[in-house]
């Protein structure tokens, strides 16, 4: 099998051709059904959830026992997706991506400044490299004082020099914010690119070198590019011809 390749193919067609129980990790960034572009428009909710259920059912079959899947969406869709997935997969985390990007002002509800990523696995995760995704402590006082912190049990806790364990709220600026030119947002290669550091965290946490990762709804190819850099094997699918060409050029560059 040739890895680090993107297929110009519908997600269900792509998954149907893959062996069952072959993927160590699946990362999916499907349409949200909020009308961002033509590929994000469905006739109605029934059509959207028929589509979602079709590819998610196939994805479960392709995942190895102990393999993990991360699915991006908004809060409402993520909650509904869980009702489709929980009978078949183990729920691990509801990850909130705080993107510091409230660009839809509203006076009838709170400004939405987040997206959701649900993390599930087929049985308990076989791989979770928690020590490799530690994050900085909010305060460095305890790190520099030279003293541990005495707990209720009388024992001393020493802070880890590499930081604290990663929590389920992730702060990464959106690509449209981090790629500003002279303070202004610019048109990106894809309207919903996920930050490199966010995808990198998922890949490092839930896979090892040479593992097979499916990059579904590849879009900008961000996941596939990071897989290549981190020495993971990837297979991706993207139906849009423009995005497909961009990913292919990027992977072969």
Image (spheres, grey):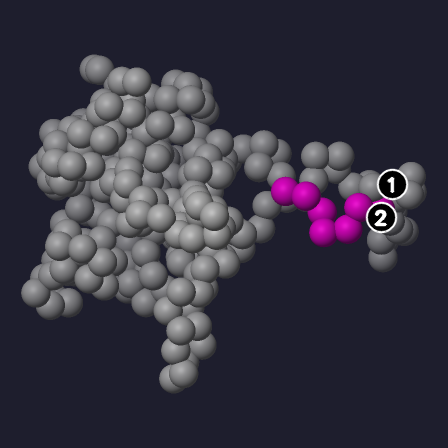
Instruction: State the residue position of label 2.
Output: 141
Note whether 76 is above or below 63 in the view shown: below
Q: Where is residue 193 in the image (x, y as percent from the top left)?
A: 34, 45
Q: Report the residue at 18% width, 33% height from top.
A: 244
Q: Report the residue at 62% width, 39% height from top.
A: 134
Q: Where is residue 199 in the image (x, y as percent from the top left)?
A: 42, 39
Note whether 215 is above or below 182 in the view shown: above
Q: Is residue 9 left or right of residue 151?
A: left
Note whether 201 is above or below 80 in the view shown: above
Q: In this view, does 44 lie to the left or right of 20?
A: left
Q: Which residue lies furthest to the bottom in this view?
A: 108
The magenta region covers 135-142
| CB-based contact (under 8 Å), mark 1 and mark 2 | yes
Q: Report the residue at 46% width, 42% height from top.
A: 198
Disc number at residue 156? none
Instruction: State the residue position of label 1.
Output: 144
Q: How many marks?
A: 2
Q: Is residue 188 left or right of residue 135?
A: left
* Residue 253 in view, yes or no: yes
Q: Which is nearer the eye, 177 or 40?
A: 177
């Amino acid at each position: 099998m040739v890895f680090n390749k993107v297929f110009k193919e519908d997600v269900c067609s792509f998954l149907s051709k893959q062996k069952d129980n072959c993927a160590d990790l699946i990362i999916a960034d499907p349409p949200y059904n909020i009308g961002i572009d033509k590929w994000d428009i469905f006739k109605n909710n029934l059509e959207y959830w028929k589509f979602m259920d079709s590819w998610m059912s196939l994805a479960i079959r392709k995942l190895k026992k102990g393999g993990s899947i991360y699915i991006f969406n908004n809060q409402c869709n993520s909650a509904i997706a869980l009702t489709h997935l929980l009978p078949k997969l183990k729920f691990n985390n509801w990850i909130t991506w705080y993107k510091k990007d409230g660009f839809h002002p509203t006076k009838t509800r709170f400004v939405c400044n987040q997206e959701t990523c649900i993390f599930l696995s087929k049985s308990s995760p076989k791989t979770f490299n928690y020590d490799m995704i530690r994050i900085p402590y909010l305060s460095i006082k305890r790190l520099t004082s030279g003293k541990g912190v005495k707990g209720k049990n009388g024992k001393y806790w020493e802070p880890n020099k590499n930081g604290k364990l990663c929590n389920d709220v992730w702060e990464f600026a959106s690509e449209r914010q981090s790629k500003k030119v002279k303070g202004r947002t610019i048109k990106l290669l894809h309207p919903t690119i996920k930050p490199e550091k966010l995808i990198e965290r998922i890949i490092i946490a839930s896979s090892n070198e040479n593992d097979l990762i499916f990059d579904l709804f590849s879009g900008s190819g961000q996941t596939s590019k990071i897989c290549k850099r981190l020495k993971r094997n990837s297979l991706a699918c993207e139906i849009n011809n423009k995005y497909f060409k961009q990913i292919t050029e990027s992977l072969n560059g």
